[in-house]
Image: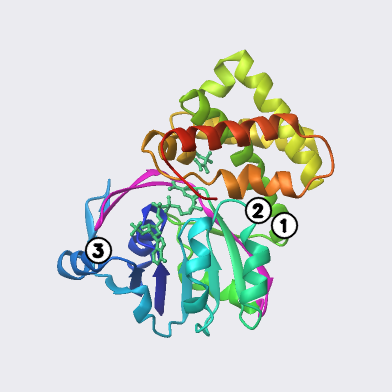
């Protein structure tokens, strides 16, 4: 199958390397030098030390594919809408957060849209090399359009070493991941600790429980079930540096807007801990010269 992957960052390169084993993959990037490097050297995948023959094009050169993965951060998406509207194949959006779904439906109302959550950990080593840091799975659910695309995704891409799981309810699927990100990401970024520290330090555990409860209240999900899920994920990823911690550490814009920002604009109940975390991360970004929402 001809598969496109938009975004040559950690997750985009991971997906391209994995799917490139069996399919003809084109990675769509925004920098000429990344395009040239991938086309010249191929894509390296660690820790397996394998090389895939994926090709690269600029996103402005987008062509018709049979399936398109979108692996940019949520705040990158608005720059892509003009290109995405030209795409006729099913599009799979792999972003943390939830705010993007409203925008996608507004702009992509004629296409088959799937959304996914990624439980793998990955770090881009350089423009043509990615390291998988955690093995998980990708969950996918249908938002609009042809539901048969879900079966096509499983039949074409699911492998034991790269599992893909279909979920019935996209809102619940994204909501459950949003709770994990609203609890783990700001706390680890603010206190600059690994994920596991949240369960080791009783004061951080208290804050995490409060954030989990407030997020569940906003999303209408059951706090007890979701806290158990947060604890499960923290245990699995205890050695991880969360993506928000890394963003703050490396003076990059974080996804706080799409995580806590989204929750704060979708609530009528009091959420003082979420509000505090939102302001605290924005303050860190501000002090590092990161501007804009
Ligand atoms: N990394 C991880 O382990 C995990 C990530 N996620 C989620 O996956 C999503 C992607 O994250 P991640 O891969 O880590 O992010 P990265 O920052 O590593 O990658 C984003 C990529 O998007 C590219 N990009 C931005 N704008 C455009 C554009 N207009 N056209 C083409 N490419 C563009 C960037 O290009 P450039 O290099 O030129 O800036 C960059 O390579 C996020 O929502 C994240 O939360 C979820 C679970 C785990
Ligand atoms: C699950 C978690 C918290 C793993 O670190 C993550 O999604 C992230 O870091 O963004």
Q: Secondary structure beneath disc 3?
A: helix
Mark in front: 1 vs 3: 3
At a point 52% along the width and 56% down the height, the residue shown is 75
Task: From the viewer's perspective, tell me whether residue 44 is left or right of residue 186.
Answer: left
Q: CA distance from mark 2 to mark 3?
A: 31 Å
Q: Is residue 154 magenta?
A: no
Residue pointed to by mark 2: 174
Q: Can you tell which quarter of the image residue 63 is in?
A: bottom left
Q: Secondary structure beneath disc 2?
A: helix
The magenta span reads 121-147
Q: Sequence order check: which comes first, mark 1 or mark 3?
A: 3
Q: CA distance from mark 1 to mark 3?
A: 35 Å
Residue neighbourhood size for the residue with mark 1, other residues' Cα within 10 Å, grouped as few (<14), some (14–19), many (≥20): some
Q: Is residue 122 magenta?
A: yes
Foreground pick, 260 / 226: 260
| Label pair 1/3, CB-CB below 8 angstroms | no
Residue neighbourhood size for the residue with mark 2, other residues' Cα within 10 Å, grouped as few (<14), some (14–19), many (≥20): many
Rendered location of residue 127, percent (x, y): 25, 56
Q: CA distance from mark 1 to mark 2?
A: 5 Å
Q: Can you tell which quarter of the image residue 16 is in?
A: bottom left
Which numbered tag is attached to residue 171?
A: 1
Rendered location of residue 194, percent (x, y): 46, 27
Label 3 CB, ligand 1: below 8 Å? yes
Q: Is residue 59 above or below residue 229?
A: below
Foreground pick, 154 / 38: 38
Task: From the viewer's perspective, tell me whether residue 263 is left or right of residue 244.
Answer: right
Rendered location of residue 261, percent (x, y): 65, 45
Residue pointed to by mark 3: 34
Q: How is the image coloured?
A: rainbow
Position of the N terminus by quadrant? bottom left
């Amino acid at each position: 199958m001809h598969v496109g992957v938009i975004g040559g960052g950690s997750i985009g390169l991971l997906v391209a390397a994995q799917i490139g084993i069996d399919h003809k993959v084109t990675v769509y990037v925004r920098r000429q030098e990344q395009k040239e490097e991938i086309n010249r050297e191929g894509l390296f995948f660690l820790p397996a030390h394998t090389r895939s023959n994926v090709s690269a094009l600029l996103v402005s050169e987008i062509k018709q594919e049979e399936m398109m993965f979108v692996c940019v951060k949520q705040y990158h998406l608005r720059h892509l809408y003009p290109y995405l509207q030209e795409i006729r194949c099913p599009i799979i959006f792999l972003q943390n957060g939830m705010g993007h779904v409203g925008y996608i439906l507004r702009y992509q109302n004629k296409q088959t849209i799937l959304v996914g959550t990624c439980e793998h950990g990955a770090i881009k080593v350089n423009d043509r090399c990615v390291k998988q840091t955690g093995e998980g799975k990708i969950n996918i659910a249908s938002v609009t359009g042809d539901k048969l695309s879900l079966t096509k995704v499983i039949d074409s891409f699911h492998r034991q070493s790269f599992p893909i799981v279909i979920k019935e309810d996209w809102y619940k699927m994204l909501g459950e991941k949003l709770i994990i990100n609203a609890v783990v990401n700001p706390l680890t970024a603010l206190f600059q600790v690994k994920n596991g520290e949240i369960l080791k330090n009783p004061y951080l555990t208290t804050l995490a429980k409060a954030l989990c409860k407030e997020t569940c209240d906003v999303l209408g999900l059951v706090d007890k079930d979701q806290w158990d899920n947060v604890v499960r994920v923290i245990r699995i990823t205890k050695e991880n540096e969360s993506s928000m911690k890394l963003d703050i550490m490396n003076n990059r814009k974080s996804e706080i807007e799409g995580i806590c920002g989204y929750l704060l604009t979708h609530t009528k109940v009091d959420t003082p801990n979420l509000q505090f975390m939102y302001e605290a991360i924005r303050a860190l970004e501000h002090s590092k010269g990161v501007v804009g929402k």
